[in-house]
Amino acid sequence: MPEIPELEATRGFFEDHLTGRAIAAAAVRIPVVFRTPANEFRETLPGDRFGRVRRHGKFLLFDLASGRVLAINPMLTGRFQYVEPAEKLPAKTCLVLDIDGGRSLRYADERLMGRLYLLPADGLAAIPGWAEGGPDLLDPALTEEVWLQRIARYRGGIKNVLVNAAFVQGIGNAYSDEILWEARINPFTPRTKLTEDELRRLYRAARDVIAWAIPLARAAMVKEDTLDDEERRDFLRVHRRGGQPCPRCGTPISEITANQRVTSFCRRCQPGLPA
């Protein structure tokens, strides 16, 4: 699942390569992922022009000269490409936008779980769950003090709190493991058992891990002026590294699978439950 580092890398790439460019053609290939009628994409996007590219949580937001926003949440398996039109289309390619100048922006989704919207700039609240979401992790308004105030509302295991979009947006399964490892906190520890110092350390770890990962994600996804965001996370230190030595202490990384989610952690660096 793309999380902040991958989406920020994608956002930055598109900001560099799409801003000011016109859409020459729009092809809707698999309509099921479109939450705005597919014909609106097909009929009204050609001739429009890209402005800023933004990110909010796990959404990419493409501002358009028409005053609309193309909002895409790739969910679990959504992926973006920016390639020559002759490049082979991935399976389950849902949307192809031919861009003035010769390249194609593509959105493919293996499980067809993503959500695509075409909305007025002031209409993002129409997206289900938008208003209920917490602040983006990188929002400057999410200070350490605000983090402490917000996290006090939540109970349960601390990893479950981190991936809860009602608390904070943009963190998923992979980077929650990395953040908790950086903070030396066991992922199964109840939030109520963590001290204020630990919760402050968790905030700083979250910001540090994302800042560390963004350039690494971009290097893995971008080759010159081509983007192919097939998931490559070889740089992660603990997530999905079960049995490999912890890069900090050498203890084999543990992995526990529950509710179809793999949690990776170091029992020495992150002591506590489970036994």
Image: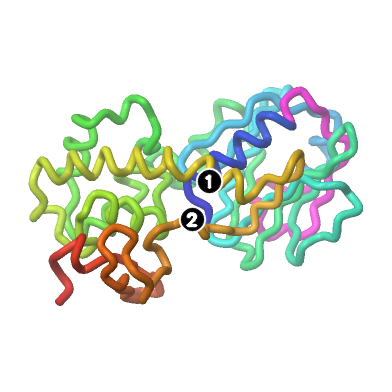
Give, as a single range, the part of the protein colored magenta. 18-40
* Vertical order, 94 against 257 (above or below): above
Residue at 69%, 24% in the rendered image? 51
Residue at 24%, 61% in the rendered image? 187
Q: Quadrant of the C terminus?
A: bottom left
How many numbered discs sit on the rendered protein?
Answer: 2
| Image location (x, y in percent) of residue 199 | 17, 44
- Disc 1 residue type (three-letter): Leu
| Image location (x, y in percent) of residue 163 | 34, 54
Distance of label 2 from label 1 (alpha carbons): 7 Å
Answer left or right for 16 relative to 60: right
Answer left or right for 218 relative to 85: left
User: Do the numbered discs 2 and 1 sit on residues whose CB atoms are within 8 Å?
Assistant: yes
Residue at 53%, 34% in the rendered image? 124
Image mark for residue 264: none
Residue on which the image places disc 1:
216
Answer left or right for 207 relative to 158: right
The residue lying toward the viewer, choosing from 230 and 119, is 230
Image mark for residue 235: 2
* Vertical order, 33 against 211 (above or below): below
Residue at 19%, 66% in the rendered image? 268
Q: Is residue 160 magenta?
A: no
The residue lying toward the viewer, choosing from 84 and 64, is 84
Which residue ends up furthest to the front in the rendered image?
Answer: 250
Determine which quarter of the picture holds residue 178: bottom left
Circle 2 packing at 10 Å, graded few (<14), some (14-19), many (20+), is few
